[in-house]
Image (tube, helix red, strand yellow):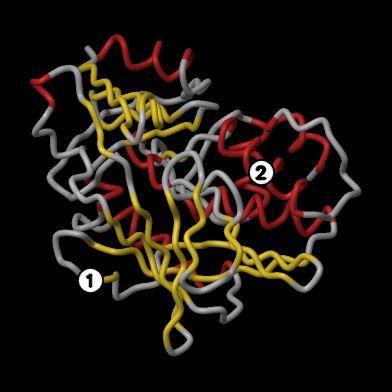
């Protein structure tokens, strides 16, 4: 695997030697704007693989994206190769309808230590929940970013990541009640501990998430990609674009329903993805918001 190929894939051309917060932020931002958060393999009849070589081939060589177990594993390799002190952590995602965190460790995130300060770096949550900058590991402090205000809190060794969202304006009234719209201004995202993990800790969950009928990943096909102003999302046949803070404390959310023949063009032109197998778009009944 070639770190220069990774840099070319994400379009990063700046310093490889400065192991500071500015460099970490730039790497994170380049990755989330170049590599989609997506699960399209599942809906093309292909596996979501965890091996680093397979992930590198999929994302870097084949210009694809992946879900958190893949894109954050790739980010871990890249940061570690550069020389950053990086640790894999495991997260429990908040289920809004059930009002509780997942019982299984289904999210992979990273801790990066710079000059004694610890940061959370996560390129794999996508949609409007995606951080654009690393979050310093400080409990109870609001950390404003372009997408929203993020907040980390710690209690008895368990950390929680939450966000405070803006109001949202949807011009097309037909989509005002869409199940894809986040309804909560204060949103819990996931919990985690600082116990170091390895990719092997996620192997059984990786299989479950792509095979179980109760998994949101088998229920819905999705793809999201951050832009300098917002985020594109494709769920099933529904394409959205959210422009963050398009006016004072309001996000603009535009919806469009695609025909099947438009899907390939949208994937190519907006998400820069060309699939090798036929995609079967799916919008099942599992909770998933953009």
Number of residue marks: 2
Q: Which of 66 and 289 is in front in this view?
A: 289
Residue 51's x, y, as percent?
Answer: 61, 56
Residue 45's x, y, as percent?
Answer: 36, 38
- The mark found on residue 56 in the picture is 2
Answer few, some or many: residues within 10 Å of disc 1's Cα (few below 14, many 20 plus, some between 14 and 19): few
- The mark found on residue 100 in the picture is 1
Residue ranking furthest to the front: 248
**Residue at 76 percent of width and 32 percent of height:** 12
Residue 121's x, y, as percent?
Answer: 60, 57
Between disc 2 and disc 1, the foreground one is: 1
Name the quadrant containing residue 281. top left
Q: Which of 255 and 251 is in front in this view?
A: 251
Name the quadrant containing residue 88. bottom right
Quarter of the figure with the C terminus: top left
**Of callouts 2 and 1, the N-terminal one:** 2
Residue 244's x, y, as percent?
Answer: 40, 31
Quarter of the figure with the N terminus: top right
200 in relation to 45, above or below: below
Answer few, some or many: residues within 10 Å of disc 2's Cα (few below 14, many 20 plus, some between 14 and 19): many
Q: What element carries label 1?
A: strand
Q: Distance between the residues labelled 2 and 1?
A: 34 Å
**Residue at 33 percent of width and 31 percent of height:** 251
Q: What element carries label 2?
A: helix
Q: Kindly indicate whether the residue at mark 1 contacts the one at mark 2 (C-beta within 8 angstroms).
A: no
**Residue at 75 percent of width and 47 percent of height:** 22
**Residue at 29 percent of width and 70 percent of height:** 102
Determine whether, in the image, residue 162 is placed left or right of residue 184. right
């Amino acid at each position: 695997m070639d770190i220069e190929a990774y840099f070319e894939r994400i379009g990063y051309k700046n310093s490889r030697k400065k192991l500071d917060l500015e460099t970490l932020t730039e790497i994170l931002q380049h990755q989330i704007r170049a590599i989609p958060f997506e699960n399209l393999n599942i809906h093309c009849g292909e596996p979501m693989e965890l091996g680093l070589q397979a992930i590198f081939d999929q994302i870097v060589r084949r210009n694809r994206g992946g879900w958190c177990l893949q894109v954050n594993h790739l980010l871990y390799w890249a940061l570690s190769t550069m020389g950053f002190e990086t640790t894999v952590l495991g997260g429990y995602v908040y289920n809004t309808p059930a009002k509780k965190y997942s019982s299984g460790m289904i999210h992979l995130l990273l801790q990066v230590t710079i000059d004694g300060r610890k940061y959370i770096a996560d390129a794999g949550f996508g949609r409007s929940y995606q951080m654009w900058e690393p979050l310093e590991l400080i409990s109870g402090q609001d950390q404003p970013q372009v997408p929203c205000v993020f907040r980390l809190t710690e209690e008895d060794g368990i950390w929680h990541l939450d966000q405070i969202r803006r109001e949202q304006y949807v011009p097309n009234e037909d989509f005002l009640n869409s199940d894809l719209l986040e309804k909560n201004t204060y949103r819990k995202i996931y919990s985690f501990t600082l116990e170091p993990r390895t990719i092997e800790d996620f192997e059984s969950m990786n299989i479950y998430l792509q095979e179980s009928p109760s998994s949101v990943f088998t229920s819905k096909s999705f793809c999201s990609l951050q832009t300098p102003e917002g985020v594109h999302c494709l769920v099933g046949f529904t394409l959205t674009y959210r422009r963050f803070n398009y006016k004072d404390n309001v996000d603009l959310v535009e919806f469009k329903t695609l025909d099947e023949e438009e899907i390939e063009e949208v994937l190519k032109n907006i998400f820069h993805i060309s699939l090798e197998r036929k995609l079967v778009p799916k919008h099942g009944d599992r909770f998933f918001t953009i």
